[in-house]
Amino acid sequence: MPSLFRKKDIVNDLLHEQTSLARTLTAKDLVIMGVGVIVGSGIFITPGIIAANYAGPGVILTYLLAALVCIGAAFCYSEFSSTIPLAGSAYTYSYSVYGEIIAWIVGWSLISEYLFAASSTAVSWSAYFRNLIAGFGIHLPKVLQSAAGTVGNPEGRFDIVAFIIVLIATTLLLQGLNESMKVNTIMVYIKIFVILLFVAVTVFYVKPKNYNPFLPFGIGGIGRGAAVAFYAFLGFDTVSSASEEVKNPKRNMPIGIIASLLIVAILYSLVSLVLVGAVNYKQLNVADPVSHALNLLNLNWISGIVSLGAIMGMTTVLLVVIYGGTRLIFSLSRDGLLPSQFKNLNKQGVPIRSTFLVGLVAATVAAVIPIEKITELVNIGTLLAFAVTSIGVISLRHSKNTRDLKPAFRVPLYPIFPIVSFAACVYLMTQLQSFTWKMYAGWTAIGLIIYFSYGYKHSNEK
């Protein structure tokens, strides 16, 4: 009987690459991809919430702390991706060092991250878009503004805008990676311009008195705020799913992962610093603190630009998380754990059925399920992948299956960094509410049923 812990023959896969995914991405493409997926609605929402409830004017410290936690995981992802340049991200890494059943659980968890991240982003995109067109006197029927049961709109039944934007993003991805990257690059540049414009304008309204007291909630508020700020950094792991489509992955993958994270940390720090300097932190406990601050400063002319930047930001997130989900399902199918149809490529080298599946499911979920329920599964799946990848670096260096592979990047301060990163991720998982754990248990149960009814029997690793 095959073992549940049979491992992927990484050396053989690297010597005989089974896929036709073209290697077209450069280090610059990866950085743009990383910035595109990390900088989304979080930068326009979380600074105000953290400042008002946890850290006050010291909100910048929460972002720096969260960035340090993420950098620990980023180092671990970089060593894995430079050693095993194959699609699948943490799923493939787990398959190589832990075995099949652990890899399946991680992969199934990541599917929830990509699917529900795409859905929740689409719902936020829809809300910003409706607010933007409302300024021109255009209003959609309430029944088509949100899903049934959405707080604030009991008449909602189907979020038509969220459904359509996911399908548009999916269609764009079907045109090929180069075409979608061109669009993604343009929107990332616009998004960064809008963020820097906000900082450049608002800095002239900063008042030193708004920084006093700097930590009104005490030192403990920094840690609690960092737990919230951490989620604004999620997404950089998606970059590792592009390993098979990168030129010189051993060099470019670490650059793409770490550089994108550092750029985002700087942007978040700048925004939070000028935000609490221009407006008292007590006034920022709103869903749109950036726009709210601009209105308080009578800078209404820039609010529309910021709303446009938020839409651009979420569009790039949507493109990259759908991309990550399609490449993960492609990898699962190629390994025999899902039906082989999901690894078929179209003329542009895109896994067409995987893309259709992710796009259609994400669009449907976005249209019919309220956002507060969608987001429950995103964070736990991501943290599990971070934790498994972090501690997996130790196994990577000692496993017979991978010890002959030569990484181009090694985690500094080994094994301290992997252990600390693992512990930090586990700690943040314990801070998630019990409802999230119950939903995750149900999602995992569904995944195990699929694995034992299909994947275990059809696995390529006999």
Image: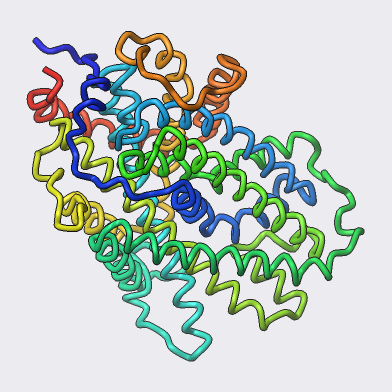
Q: Nearer the viewer, residue 145 or 454?
A: 454
> In the figure, 129 relative to 39: above or below?
below
Q: Residue at x 55, y 39 (%)?
A: 258
Quadrant of the rendered image containing residue 85:
top left
Which residue, as the protein is rendered here, is positioned at the far front?
248
Q: Position of residue 414 (x, y in %)?
A: 57, 16
Q: Position of residue 164 (x, y in %)?
A: 29, 70
Q: Position of residue 8 (x, y in %)?
A: 23, 21
Q: Position of residue 185 (x, y in %)?
A: 46, 62
Residue 342 visible, this orientation: yes
Instruction: Tell me which colouring the rendered structure shows.
Output: rainbow
> In the figure, 359 relative to 290: above or below?
above
> In the figure, 45 relative to 237: above or below?
below
Q: How many marks?
A: 0
Q: Nearer the viewer, residue 178 or 343?
A: 178
In this rendering, would 432 be left or right of 64?
Answer: left
Residue 157 visible, this orientation: no
In this rendering, would 378 be left or right of 431?
Answer: left
Q: Residue at x 31, y 39 (%)?
A: 244
The quarter of the rendered structure image containing the C terminus is top left
Which residue, as the protein is rendered here, is positioned at the far bottom?
137
Quadrant of the rendered image containing residue 112:
top left
The quarter of the rendered structure image containing the N terminus is top left
Q: Residue at x 33, y 65 (%)?
A: 147
Q: Residue at x 79, y 42 (%)?
A: 217
